[in-house]
Amino acid sequence: MRSVLSVSLPKKLAIELEVLSKETGRNKSDIVKESLAEFLWENRFRRIKKRLSSNAKKAGFVTDEDVFKAIS
């Protein structure tokens, strides 16, 4: 099932989207869908990371390097 969403963009953002669309040969709708999907994924990742960070610190995982050392 698809849903239609109308979005009002500031002029500068609309121009940048138009330019990118022309440069890449992609339609604006596909660019916006991809951008929104990436934004939502990053948002979910940040929320999960925040929720798990206290447990990770207790286990000694403070940096990304700590994680890489543990799994290498």
Image (tube, rainbow, N blue to C red):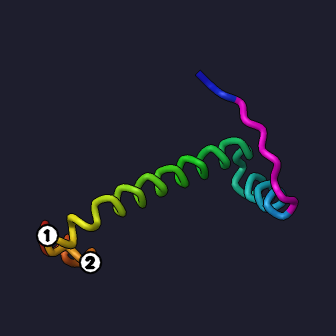
Measuring from the top left, give residue 71's x and y in whole percent.
13, 66
Q: Point out which mark residue 20 bears.
A: none
Image quarter in which the N terminus is found: top right
Q: Is residue 67 visible?
A: yes
Task: Residue under label 2, please give it.
Answer: 63
**Amino acid of disc 2:** Thr
32 lies above or below 1? below
Task: Residue under label 1, please give it.
Answer: 59
Residue at image location 74% in from the left, 46% down from the top: 28
24 lies above or below 30? below
Q: In the picture, residue 63 is in which quadrant?
A: bottom left
Residue at image location 76% in from the left, 56% down from the top: 17
Q: Is residue 47 left or right of residue 21?
A: left
Comparing 12 with 53, the one in front is: 53
Judged from the image, the secondary structure of the residue bearing numbered disc 1 is: loop
Q: In the picture, residue 14 is in which quadrant?
A: bottom right
Looking at this view, name the residue that lies furthest to the right.
11
Q: Is residue 72 visible?
A: no
Q: Is residue 44 left or right of residue 22?
A: left
Image quarter in which the C terminus is found: bottom left
Q: Is residue 38 left or right of residue 3?
A: left
Q: In the picture, residue 39 is in which quadrant?
A: bottom right
Q: Please report the bounds of the magenta region as a residue range.
A: 4-11
67 lies above or below 15? below
Spatial CA distance of label 2 from label 1 is 12 Å
Judge the density around disc 2: few (<14), some (14-19), many (≥20) Cα neighbours within 10 Å: few
Comparing 4 with 19, the one in front is: 4
12 lies above or below 29? below
Residue at image location 74% in from the left, 58% down from the top: 20
Measuring from the top left, give residue 26's x and y in whole percent.
70, 47
Residue at image location 73% in from the left, 44% down from the top: 27
Reply yes or no: does residue 47 show up in magenta: no
